Image (spheres, rainbow, N blue to C red):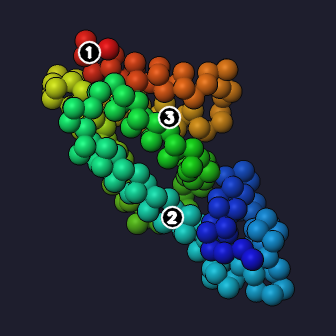
Amino acid sequence: MANRQDIIKASAKLFAANGFSATSVSHISEAVGLSASAGGIYRHFKSKEAIFDAIFDDYFENYTAFLTAVDSNMSSADGVDKRQLARTLLGLALHQAKMSDAVVKIYLKDQNRLKADHIAQAARIRENSVAAFEVVSGYISGNDTTFDAEAVAGILIDSINFRVSNLVPEFGVTEDRYLSALTDLLYSLIGTDDI
């Protein structure tokens, strides 16, 4: 029997592929194997709009967990190889983006449906993501402040989101090669000689 989380995941994929308006509760019920006649989806959600909201609530909760993992890695970073730490954190960011690629697509397709609270949460997530990358960049650079940490964070975050968006093929670049190149890019953007 499908649970609330199953419904959120299936709905996110359907909304990402077809858009909110073109996805019906019947489509969602079918995707998770619930019978519309037995109340199916409505035992878990009041409406399709409630599912849409839950997708973003779930995303923000998971992203907060991701930022906690970054903080945890940074708090134990003393004596750790900086390059490996950077690669690990970029790998965490890539993993998080891959897990939420449907949410990014929904956001791009149905931005006008977002509640004001979700827009505010998205802004806070961006600020927290930039702050996390600023901490990482500061650690790698020895707290050099001559580079634009916000721009560096934007470039890295946008690159990762673009990679998982499926807008372009991967051109045979494996995830390992991508993370190595992204780590090199981070070092280049920071301007450190410690490569």
The residue labelled by disc 2 is 58
* Residue bearing mark 1: 194
Of residues 29 and 4, the one drawn nearer to the viewer in this rendering: 4
Residue at 61 percent of width and 69 percent of height: 5
- Mark with earlier residue (1, 2): 2
* Quadrant including the N terminus: bottom right
Marking on residue 160? 3
SS state under label 3: helix
The amino acid marked with disc number 2 is: Asp
Label 3 to label 1: alpha-carbon separation: 23 Å
Q: Amino acid under label 3?
A: Ile
Q: Quadrant of residue 41?
A: bottom right
Structural crowding at the residue carrying mark 3, measured as other residues with C-alpha within 10 Å and reported as few (<14), some (14–19) or many (≥20): many
Point out residue 98 in the picture as x, y percentages from the top left corner.
57, 44
CA gap between label 2 and label 3 equals 20 Å
Residue neighbourhood size for the residue with mark 1, other residues' Cα within 10 Å, grouped as few (<14), some (14–19), many (≥20):
few
Which tag, 3 or 1, sits closer to the chain's start? 3
Q: Say what secondary structure mark 1 lies in.
A: loop
Vertical comparison of 118 with 72: above or below? below
Tell me if residue 127 comes above or below residue 6 in the rendering: above
Instruction: From the top left corner, tell me how far across and down residue 23 is, in percent.
Output: 75, 63
Q: Are marks 3 and 1 in contact (CB under 8 Å)?
A: no
Q: Quadrant of the C terminus?
A: top left
Instruction: Characterize the local packing of mark 2: few (<14), some (14-19) or many (20 or more) Cα atoms within 10 angstroms.
Output: some
Q: Secondary structure at mark 2?
A: helix
Q: What's under tag 1, amino acid-wise? A: Asp
